[in-house]
Every structure is written in structure tokens, then in C-alpha cells.
């Protein structure tokens, strides 16, 4: 990617961008339709769970914006059970 985000950036793919947009601090409330769309993408794409874990970890770690953390935790509550298992088995960073 010459002029885009790095391939190492969790927000470089479409799912990461959706997660970033859905958990942006400028949002007044949770966008449940967007959350469900994210869950659908995670369930229907091969790299969905892996990409979601990367984006969610980046959104929560070293983030001092309480609104973004609150929105991210709301999204985590809606994630498919299979992804929650993946998150629970990850080693602590």
C-alpha cells in the first residue's frame, strides 16, 4: 500500500475500519445496526475473527478515551461466542 495504511495497522482492512468508526468517541450512542453488521462480517469471512481481535486490542490498549472504551466494550458484548473464545485464549499482552 503506497498511500494507505500499513498492512500491520489493524484498521487497514475494511473490518478494522468499521470497528474504528463504530467505536469513535464522537458517536453519541451505540450504533447497534453497525455492531450487528460487524458481527455478520466476522461470522462470514475467513479472516474476520483474526482481524477483529487485532482491531479491538488496539482500540482498548493504551486508550485513555473513556467513550471509545465504553463503545468498544459494548461491541465486545455483542460479538459471536466463537470470537469471545478466541479472545479468552489469547496470552496477556
Image (spheres, rainbow, N blue to C red):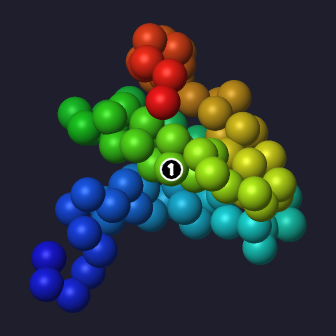
In this orientation, which residue lies closer to the viewer: 70 or 30? 70
| Residue 90 as seen in the image, left or right of residue 31 | left
Residue situated furthest bottom in the rendering = 3
Q: Position of residue 84 (x, y in %)?
A: 53, 19
Residue at image mark 1 = 58
Visible residue check, residue 33: no
Residue situated furthest left in the rendering = 2
The answer to which quarter of the image holds residue 44 is top left
The answer to which quarter of the image holds residue 50 is top left
Quadrant, the N terminus: bottom left
Q: Residue at x 75, y 57 (%)?
A: 64
Q: Position of residue 68 (x, y in %)?
A: 73, 57
In this orientation, which residue lies closer to the viewer: 57 or 16? 57
Q: Residue at x 44, y 12 (%)?
A: 89
| Residue 54 as seen in the image, left or right of residue 63 | left
Q: Position of residue 9 (x, y in %)?
A: 33, 61
Visible residue check, residue 84: yes
In this orientation, which residue lies closer to the viewer: 73 or 92? 92
Instruction: Tell me the element at label 1.
Output: helix
Question: How many numbered callouts?
Answer: 1
State whether residue 32 is above or below residue 40.
below
State whether residue 92 is above or below residue 27.
above
Q: Position of residue 75 (x, y in %)?
A: 66, 40
Amino acid at each position: 500500500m503506497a498511500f494507505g495504511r500499513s498492512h500491520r495497522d489493524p484498521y487497514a482492512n475494511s473490518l478494522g475500519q468499521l470497528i474504528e468508526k463504530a467505536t469513535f468517541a464522537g458517536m453519541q450512542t451505540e450504533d447497534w445496526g453497525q455492531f450487528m453488521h460487524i458481527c455478520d462480517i466476522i461470522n462470514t469471512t475467513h479472516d474476520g475473527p483474526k482481524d477483529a481481535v487485532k482491531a479491538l486490542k488496539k482500540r482498548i490498549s493504551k486508550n485513555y478515551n473513556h467513550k471509545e472504551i465504553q463503545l468498544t466494550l459494548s461491541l465486545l458484548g455483542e460479538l459471536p461466542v466463537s470470537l469471545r473464545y478466541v479472545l479468552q485464549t489469547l496470552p496477556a499482552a
